[in-house]
Image (cartoon, rainbow, N blue to C red):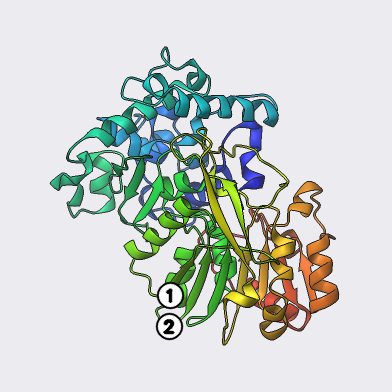
Amino acid sequence: SSNACVAMHGLATATRPALAASLLIAILSAGEDVDCWENGVTPGQCCNFIFGPSGNSLCWDGGQYTFDTCCKGKSYRPRNCNDFVTHFNFQVVGVGGSTEHAGKVWEKCAVAMEMKPSRCNSVNTTMRSCPECAMLSHHFTHYIRCVREEQLRETPSASCPACGRRAGAREIADEGGGGSAAIVGGYHFPTLLRPRSAGRDFTLLASAFDMTVGHQLIAEGHWMRQEVDLLKAFLPVGGVAVDAGANIGGFALPLSKHVGPDGQVHAFEPFRNIHQILTANCALNGLLSCITHHNALGNQPEKRKKRMPGLAAVGNPSKSYVVNQVASELLVHHDSHGRMEDVEVVRLDDKLTLDRLDVIKIDVESGEFDMLLGAEATLRQHQPVIYVEDSEDEASPSARSPSTRVTRLLSEKHGYRCYNPAEFDLVFMTSTLCIPNKMVDEVRARIRGIVWSGPPR
């Protein structure tokens, strides 16, 4: 559910709303005496010199929490390439102008990274050698160079003994950027592995040039935390959820942890390398209830030949799509060498036989209507709460309940009512909430009882 975020200011700033929800509010909500660096927030996120002389503006409230009080008026400067990669933030990368113009600049950089790697994707990359990427930010060309430098090390910098030192949040913060250090790996495309640390529940793997979901998981340790809170309200311990379009686990990991070892989270991801990262993240965190499926969900069993996501260059792989036409291709980068893969499409009704189903989260890049057509028997039997990124609603957003093919299908055939979350006074939400008519009052009560880990509502 990254559409609404990616287009802001023509930049790849998919993390801005989540930063506002987590970096700032996590600090402010804890009380006057709280350390600035609790709840997983770090100096590397807030005091980093890449944001300029006043740090990351999304961290400050203009009162108690400021650059001067939290950073002591001093910018955090990474000591080496490993530090720079660990605390890098794609928020500082981008160009102004229209989203169409920004998308072209990003794609020009991505193509150069894949087709001209000696000058745009190597230890020799500089602003001068790669003007295509320097247009986005000189910090980004440095990030590319550091990723590749760390990738070539026989022993990763982050495997040093100091990285496993046990210390309180303040002690760690005093040593540098805070949190655990990222390990750079990978052969055909670079990967980042960041172990869990104070305030961050999961050890996480992502491709190093994923500038949206993967980046935020590495930088902050979570994805769309407020939406995860919402779905947890309808998903009991021991419950069952389907995550359609799971990407690398931004929803699947916290929901699986929440339902416990006797629950189930069925996470569907159609693209092979993304599915491999998703599965690795479930395994790294020992989640018995995280069940991954290498499939797309639709209404007709078939195999489709699709272009592979281009993970060796900058892009937004969470927007990779299986359907023939999508609402937006902004910042989607396909493999520049033309590599293809076979994607297997299955019907949810054929794939799973469940005793219960509490929640379905859907983010399938304009394939949501067909996906629901292939799940009609499941919907009739279980009547789950549905949280769906509706591409038709995104094309004509409003503050009122949407009327689209998806919402009409659910309303007319399955007894649902669909809401814009704003109707529940919920902010920072990116999808449509569809509720069985018989559960509307219950859902309202559950929403009122949510203890938000993001901003107060």
Identity of the residue furthest to the bottom in this view: 355
**Residue receiving disc 1:** 289
Residue in the picture at 57% in, 71% down: 242
Do the residues under discs 1 and 2 have CB atoms within 8 angstroms? yes
CA–CA distance between discs 1 and 2?
7 Å
The front one of 284 and 454 is: 284
Q: Picture coordinates of residue 376 (x, y %)? A: 73, 76
Q: Amino acid at mark 2?
A: Asp
Identity of the residue furthest to the top in this view: 128
Quarter of the image where the C terminus is located: bottom right
In this picture, is 1 found above or below 440? above
Q: Total label count?
A: 2
Q: For numbered disc 1, what is the local secondary structure?
A: loop
Label 1 packing within 10 angstroms: few (<14), some (14-19), many (20+): many
Q: For numbered disc 2, what is the local secondary structure?
A: loop
In this picture, is 445 found above or below 310? below
**Residue receiving disc 2:** 262
Query: Which callout, 1 or 2, points at the residue further toward the start of the chain?
Result: 2
Query: Does 200 sit left or right of 358 as displayed?
Result: left
